[in-house]
Image (cartoon, rainbow, N blue to C red):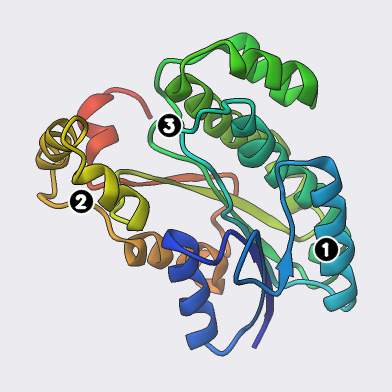
Amino acid sequence: MGIHAMTGGATGIGAAIRARLLAAGHRVIVVDVKDADIIADLGTAEGRQSALAALRALAPEGLDGFVPCAGVAGHIPDRALLPSVNYFGTVDLLLGLRDLLVARRGAVVLISSNSAPGPTSEEYIEALLAHDEPRARELAAGIAGQWAYAGSKRALARWMRRQAADWAREGVRLNAIAPGYTQTPMTAAVEQDPTYGPPIRKFMASIPVGRPGQPDDMADAVMFLLSPAAGFVCGSVLFVDGGHDAMQRPDVL
């Protein structure tokens, strides 16, 4: 069995992925702000460097897989955290672990979102892709939370697509999933909110397959992309959203 690392494995989608990896017999090293093998705040450069040092110490022989799942949603008051956690907390760790993934021809699955195609700021996305964290944080603080969230996830998908061929030549497959609405402890609280609950329930009712997503739905997709069964899948974004993206953007491939 393999050695896998992941971030954000304490709750929600991340916890489901962790459980699935462990059930398959893999060794799993989790980075999170709580209940993890490595406690680190990926919203800061110092936290990312601390996480990288700890990961390298725990898996010096290399990694068979990496799932950077840590993220924050657009409702948080400090919108500058969105680029720091969602984008830099993923990309910085990937860059720092590249040689460990090459050593074992590992697979990587990023977590984008079906919100990624939504309204956002192109200037913000360009700051992210230019790896200009101070500018990205400044721009995120000045736009709506959903725009900052969507932009961070779109930039992740673009980064992955731009890097996929180069990493593949070294034996590492990069892919991403784009989850739709998924019921987790965090979204359960929103569903019960007197203000946000009714529109959220209406939104859930619009999902073409007739139900909201569950963490296990996302874990299923991640496990496929990590596996040898996906050995010819590289540079892809897999929408796991019950058909919402197809419904909203039917002519976009």
Q: Residue furthest front?
A: 194
Say which residue appears at 77% left-offset and 51% top-offset.
93
Give SS at disc 2: loop
Checking the image for residue 102, the label placed there is 1
Q: Nearer the viewer, residue 79 or 217?
A: 79
Q: Nearer the viewer, residue 166 or 114?
A: 114
Give the distance between the C-alpha atoms of the residues marked 3 and 1, in whole angstroms: 37 Å
Q: Nearer the viewer, residue 47 or 109?
A: 47
Which is more foreground, mark 3 or mark 2? 3
- The residue pinned by badge 3 equals 75
Which three-letter amino acid code belongs to the residue tagged 2?
Pro
Q: Position of residue 32 (x, y in %)?
A: 64, 61
Give SS at disc 3: loop
Which three-letter amino acid code belongs to the residue tagged 1?
Val
Q: Position of residue 105 (x, y in %)?
A: 76, 68
- The residue pinned by badge 2 equals 212
Give the distance between the C-alpha atoms of the residues marked 1 and 2, in whole angstroms: 36 Å
